[in-house]
Amino acid sequence: MRLKTMLATGLLATGLLLVLAVGCAAPTVGLDGGRLRACPESPNCVCSEVAPDSAAYVAPFAVPEGVEPAEAFARLARTVEGRAAVETREDGYLHAVFKTALLRFRDDFEARLDREAGLIHVRSASRLGYSDLGKNRKRIEALREAYDAAGR
């Protein structure tokens, strides 16, 4: 019985170490041809730069009429900074890492300013797992609500 317990503990520890190693791996983020990267086939990512009929589609943020696009983007960046660790902030591009409350899994959030269209494209993706149970979509919508409220 003691050997079974030791083996089970060893397997559990190995599994946890593997999950942590994969969860801490560097994400695939950044622009690809001037656009946010497409989502993988797994349902743990949403993006405004995929086809609108895709399950991964989420609407981009609108730059409000009469507001400079750079100011709208700065507003979104401030909204994100209060909730996540900003990894990269460049002219018209933002990458931040959110951590889930319970197990501290890392999710990558990206935003890209499209000045000509008056839009801020967004992408949120889990680094680990197959499904996120809608967490990334909920995050985008919560950010949208906070972004809109900050402009009032």
Image: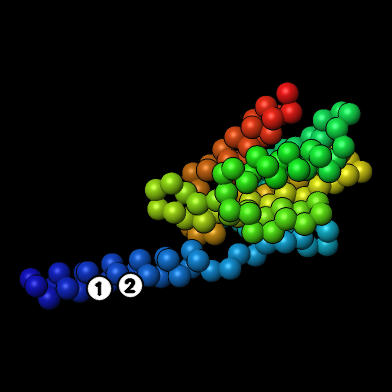
Q: Real-space Cα distance between discs 1 and 2?
A: 6 Å
Q: Nearer the viewer, residue 145 or 123?
A: 145
Number of labelled discs? 2
- Indicate whether 21 appears above or below 102: below
Q: Nearer the viewer, residue 140 or 75?
A: 75
Q: Which of the 4 image quadrants contains residue 16?
A: bottom left
Given the current orientation, which residue lies at the most extreme top position?
152
Quadrant holding the C terminus: top right
- x, y (%) of residue 137? 59, 41
Quadrant holding the N terminus: bottom left
User: What type is the residue that disc 2 sits on?
Assistant: Thr
Q: Is residue 77 visible?
A: yes
Residue receiving disc 2:
14
The crowd level at tag 2 (other Cα within 10 Å; few <14, some 14-19, many 20+) is: few
Q: Who's the residue at 84% across and 43% down the image?
A: 70
The crowd level at tag 1 (other Cα within 10 Å; few <14, some 14-19, many 20+) is: few
Residue receiving disc 1:
10
Q: Who's the residue at 47% across and 49% down the image?
A: 100
Q: Who's the residue at 63% across and 37% down the image?
A: 143
**Image marks 1 and 2: residues in contact by CB distance under 8 Å:** yes
- x, y (%) of residue 9? 22, 69
User: What type is the residue that disc 1 sits on?
Assistant: Gly
- Indicate whether 128 appears above or below 74: below
Q: Say which element carries label 2.
A: helix
Given the current orientation, which residue lies at the most extreme right position?
116
Given the current orientation, which residue lies at the most extreme left position?
1
- Indicate whether 6 appears above or below 144: below
